[in-house]
Image (cartoon, grey):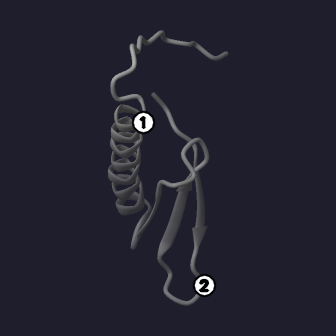
Amino acid sequence: MEYTISIQKDAKSGWYCGQCVQLPAAISQGETLNELMENMKDAISLVLEYNKEQLKKNTKGEKTFYRKLAMA
């Protein structure tokens, strides 16, 4: 899966700050673009895991099934 990252470079520190467009809660920073992108992978993974745990918590005891949805 691919994600789009909105990136800004801080004028004072020179660090890169990023936010995932599809998962706005996934935010990170890095001294270099490569470091930022690696940190964003971690941030996205953490948000996805959190969302999964919240879904489990909110649907506890209910019959749940899943289907994949492809977007063009």
What is the secondary structure assignment of the residue under circle 1?
Answer: helix
Kind of residue indicated by mark 2: Ala
Q: Which of 66 and 2 is in front in this view?
A: 66
Q: How crowded is mark 2: few (under 14 residues within 10 Å), some or many (20 or more)?
A: few
Q: Which residue lies furthest to the right in this view?
A: 72
Q: Mark 2 points at which residue?
A: 11
Alpha-carbon span between mark 2 and mark 1: 42 Å
Q: Which of marks 2 and 1 is nearer the N terminus?
A: 2
Residue 71 percent location from the top left of the image: 63, 17
Q: Nearer the viewer, mark 2 or mark 1?
A: 1
Q: Nearer the viewer, residue 50 or 69?
A: 50
Q: Which amino acid, by three-letter code, is at mark 1?
A: Asn
The residue to which callout 1 is attached is 58
Q: Label 1 neighbourhood size at 10 Å, few (<14), some (14-19), many (20+)?
A: few
Say which residue appears at 59% left-offset and 41% top-offset. 22
Q: Is residue 34 above or below residue 31?
A: above
Q: Where is residue 50 in the image (x, y as percent from the top left)?
A: 36, 46
Who's the residue at 45% across and 27% down the image?
1
